[in-house]
Amino acid sequence: MAEALKAAYLIFGTNRPRVELAVRRLRDRFGPDAVERLEASDTSGEEAVAACNAGGLFASGGRAVIVNGVERWKVADAKVVGAYLDDPAPETVLALLAEQLRRDSALVKAIGKRGQILAYDVAKRELPEWVSAQLRERGVTTSSGLARELIELVGDDMHELACEIDKLATWAGDEKIGEKELELLVCPRGEVAPFGLTDAWGRRDARAALAAYELLLERASESRQALLTRLAALLSAHVGKVQACRRLSQQGLGPREAAAQLGMHPYAAEKAFAQARNFSEAELRRATVRLAALDLALKGGSRLPSELEFERALIALTKAA
């Protein structure tokens, strides 16, 4: 038996797929002609209440008034809704949707007294576990750290992440998903995700580093010069973290202790520790100097094409001493 509906719901949060599911489940409780959709951008709290009180226009079995974007509303709108909930229209549900709201906002307080708050938030630090859980629910086997790499490619928009997770699950079947599959199936958004490049450097695999570099060039949405400058800076920062992890390892610290000390994610620290074992301290110092020279070359210090300067640097950084 379906649970009795409240007179009002306030639904919001960063987990947009979960918000959309909650709205869909609520909407499905009513007939198609018994749902009225409004936008807070052109609907006040008073007008939303008036829509709730306008009964008799729809078929029996109840009706729903859904107002999207109520984070725009003011305190006065929240007060009108709160007063309405003291004596709500029978068999009518008012559903208010927002991107994000403060937990102490007037609207949260108004709905909390007579209705139900449905807040679906996932903190950024919890995103990797959320992605991993979504993949597990779909029966997808993944390589270690894939969730963080997917986030690097897609960003932290949970709706886009959910779409990519569905795509990976559809493709996977009984196959394991790893970095290679991510590169083939996922279209990067936003800033460049250079983990393929840094991982190849960490393995001292020049061929893989050059291939990752070429892939980044193909997918770039910014100018070549801007991309190369950013990649050089990111690679330099990564080498610095590997060097720091190497020194902490020599002091007897493990990846988790190093992660806390350096402000890194434990998974990233584990990768940096593994990569540090492939380089001597002298090689890492030389890598820092070589990357500084690359930065100068990219900023006008060389007559060679920037792409060629970057390729030469990659080969020098990955080759054995």
Image: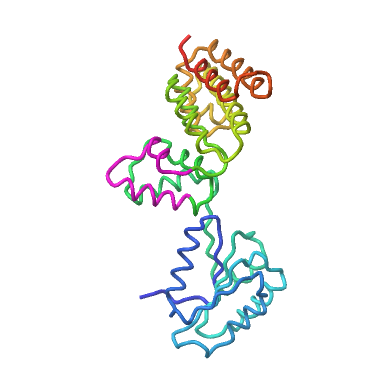
Q: Position of residue 95 (x, y in %)?
A: 55, 72
Instruction: Say above or below: 118 vs 145.
Output: below
Q: How many marks?
A: 0
The residue shown at (61%, 27%) is 233
Residue 72 drawn in magenta:
no
Compare residues 29 and 1 and report the one nearer the observer: 29
Is residue 170 located in the magenta-colored stretch of the structure?
yes
Up/down of 114 relative to 217, above or below: below
Residue 135 in the image: x percent, y percent? 38, 47
> In the rendered image, which quarter contains the N terminus?
bottom left
Task: Spot the residue most to the left.
Answer: 174
Q: Residue at x 68, y 22 (%)?
A: 300
Quadrant of the rendered image containing residue 11: bottom right
Magenta-drawn segment: 161-187
Q: Nearer the viewer, residue 57 or 123?
A: 57
Q: Residue furthest bottom?
A: 56
